[in-house]
Amino acid sequence: MMRSMHMGNSAPARGIAAIVGVGPKLGRSVARKFAHEGYTVAILARDLDCSDSRSIREAFEGVLSLGFVEVLVYNAYCPAALQPTNFADVSLAAFERSLAVSSVGAFLCAQQVIPGMVERRKGTILFTGCAASLNGIPGFSDLCCGKFALRGLSQCLAREFQALGVHIAHVVIDGLVGSPRGPSSTSPSTGSTTGGGWWQRTAVVGEQLVQRQQVEGEVVVDGGGPPEPMMMMMDPDSLAQTYWHLHVQDRTCWTQEIDLRPSHSQQ
């Protein structure tokens, strides 16, 4: 499904920003930010089959009919299992699905927009990764391989096209993404209001849940039982500000990869 949005009280439309994989948190915040900055945002929601070349092609026919796609944000992901899966029990279908959504879908979407960006010698492509993009995690081989491939694709495209004016970056979201917090939040441990983050009481049961928290940025897993440490959640609106900053960076100092995590992290 594709729909477009533009905030009428913002600056005149500057171009098209295509956001692939828009859920209620990060994707929505990124879409709002670019719309606020004057872009017409084409939202390709999570019901789009990012593993299917025909679906991608047909979706982008609609997007490209709106005009030049100056920004592509690839935020699609294949939901991982809630618990680690023994390698011998990982199905071929699950493994291929993770590769298809995480990397093949990104490949197909990038192919749709890069020619126009190269022609105009401008454009930005931002790929969303997670902790599984950087480190192998036992029990999550399917997810890690898909995210590793996405990171490799980002590096290859950056080295091929940045000299032609296309900024390509990989954004590692290393933490849990909460709901937008607004201008301030209250820490339940102190009762004080602060602009520095907000909190979720989450039960941590052994290493497995810690790994799961690192793997999936938009899912909170309640493992049950003590202890119950306070976890700082990542504000999707603040993350969206970083995506915007990457887009408007001066081309003399482009970022190719950035990792983002809360100040109170598990690391």
Image: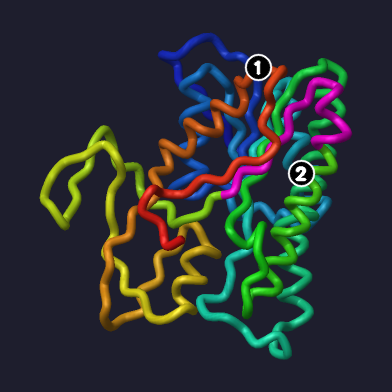
Q: Quadrant of residue 223?
A: bottom left
Q: In which quarter of the image is residue 114?
A: top right
Q: Percent x, y for residue 74?
A: 66, 44
Q: Give the CA separation, mark 1 to mark 2.
A: 19 Å
Amino acid at pointer 2: Ser
On screen, residue 11 above or below 231: above
Query: What are the residue bounds of the magenta stretch?
Result: 158-172
Report the residue at 45% width, 14% height from top: 10
| Left or right for 135, reference 27 | right
Residue neighbourhood size for the residue with mark 2, other residues' Cα within 10 Å, grouped as few (<14), some (14–19), many (≥20): many
Depth check, mark 1 against mark 2: the one in front is: 1
| Left or right for 227, reference 245 | left
On screen, residue 229 above or below 10: below
What count of labels does the image hold? Answer: 2
Q: Which of 179 and 138 is in front in this view?
A: 138
Amino acid at pointer 1: Asp
Tags 1 and 2 in contact by the CB under 8 Å rule? no
On screen, residue 57 above or below 228: above
- The outermost residue toward the bottom is 88
Which residue is tagged 1?
Answer: 250
Res. 111 visible in picture? yes
Q: Percent x, y for residue 154?
A: 76, 44
> What mark, if any, has residue 154 been given in the picture?
2
Residue neighbourhood size for the residue with mark 1, other residues' Cα within 10 Å, grouped as few (<14), some (14–19), many (≥20): few
Q: Which secondary structure lies at badge 2? A: helix
